[in-house]
Amino acid sequence: MYRSHNCGELNASHINTEVTLSGWVQKSRDKGFIIWVDLRDRYGITQLVFDEERTSKELLERAQKLGREFVIQVKGKVVERDSKNPNLPTGAIEILVSELTILNQALLPPFTIEDKTDGGEDIRMKYRYLDIRRNPVKNNLIFRAKVTQEVRNYLSNDGFIEVETPYLIKSTPEGARDFVVPSRMNAGEFYALPQSPQTFKQLLMVGGMDKYFQIVKCFRDEDLRADRQPEFTQIDCEMAFVEQEDILNVFEGLTRHLLKEVNGVEIEKFPRLLYDDAMRLYGNDKPDIRFGMEFGELNAVAQHKDFGVFNSAELVVGIAVPGGNTYTRKEIDKLIDWVKRPQVGALGMVYARCNDDGSFKSSVDKFYDQEDLAKWAETTGAKPGDLICVLSGEINKVRAQLSALRMELATRLGLRDPKVFAPLWVIDFPLLELDEETGHYHAMHHPFTSPKPGQIELLDTNPGDVKANAYDLVLNGNEIGGGSIRIHDKATQAIMLKHLGFSDAEAKAQFGFLMDAFEYGAPPHGGLAFGLDRLVAILGGQETIRDFIAFPKNNSGRDVMIDAPAPIDDEQLKELSLKLNLKS
């Protein structure tokens, strides 16, 4: 037996008990005549003591040679600690060691294994197995396990059946590039890793499973950022004989359950926002509603006043920054520089100060009088002491730019409290999205999303006006889940694929298996998938998913710990019937 107790459970009630502990040496303090060693495991820290009055000379000498991260086993008696540590659960006791076994020595770690480490992200990713020993990462992984278990329990108790689906599948267009896997047994042919189990969960509904879920790895070969990974985890769900309202109720219930059980937060009802309203009021389809600063469209009150910048714009839109009139001219100039960055792309920003006496002072006073500016304030909801920030340009671009500014200002003003949770549903998305470069439409969600009832005829006349039977669940400005009611008959699916540019032959080649299944009695069905990594991060008070993944990739999609991806040798290439054509 390596241990009778763990390093986080002993307290004053165990005094005079003989115990065996195992763990890692966190640190030691050698006073010559007495040595204290902090022993750490997953559960906590227990202080060990070796002293010349109660410890043999040989044992004291061995204790002096212990280095950081040595793996050791000790036996000894629990004794009362003279100088107690109220910050530790074990702070009232220590172990008077009678036996010491070194189970494994350790090199000096390349960074300190402390909550606040001296290691940068790159070095910690290279030695991730050491980083996991630190409390912040360890606790994040334990937190993830708790959330995952709550999800599994909730869905299982609601009659969902957990079913695994294949990883080696056929490449199908779902909006991102596939990772492909060559087949040795079928030379020149490839599997794809699933971007989601989309078609399989629909086939499970055809198979009569009725309620399915899976906590599943998905893969997308796309450009990365802090909240994206090439492999990620979904809580994937599907239900038969349901309408949109059924789906929303079930998964709103799951989210309320998680907020209550994991965060102690109770929210009765999630608001619902039409996609068009989300874009109009917040400039994006995943608005953060923990704070206000809703958009005010100013075309009617800002155009036709001899200010050419506004007159030539498709949209003039502003927000009221609470308390922003305290900003100095230098601070406002920095805001203007911020929106002009390439990442945002605005050409400039107009502003108006709302003075405490009810008057206004703007950067365009030459063109607008006090009455005009009062209308700006009314439209944006600005109050005395606020600052009105105004952008103009093409509708979609300017909305995205002002949305970015809104989020940046909220961060600076401390309005994005990670302990406050503001979920909402965004519904009635467009079915199709126009690719401005090609002029062709593609599915905003995926090709299996059904149009809203009675709108399929619009595909021939006004495809951009067709609304999808689709919905996203948003939490604190992040999409944590999304789904739709699916197409469940072959004729409608064929029409949809035709409008997405598939010929009959291409549709059959890509999706023939699914369309064939629809001819054998497919029920109406729909579902939703949560992004588990992002959900866990937000519930944990963060927005970056990497620290909640045991072994993440970096922004180049590399695992620097195991050095992957890596070349394979010529013999493997030959076996797979592959030939590289790399350009220098």
Image (tube, grey):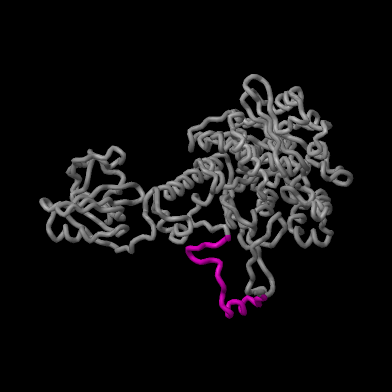
- Residue 284 seen in this snapshot: no
Residue plotted at (71% across, 54% down): 175
Image quadrant where one finds the N terminus: bottom left
* Camera-side residue of 82 and 154: 82
Image quadrant where one finds the C terminus: bottom right
* Camera-side residue of 38 and 577: 38
* Camera-side residue of 110 and 442: 110
Give x and y (percent) for residue 396.
75, 43
Give x and y (percent) for residue 47.
25, 48
Residue plotted at (12% across, 51% down): 54
Q: What stretch of residues is rendered in magenta?
A: 556-581
Residue, far left: 53
Magenta span includes 125: no
Residue, far right: 461
Residue, far top: 357
Give x and y (percent) for residue 320.
66, 30
Drawn side of residue 122 relative to residue 176, left or right: left
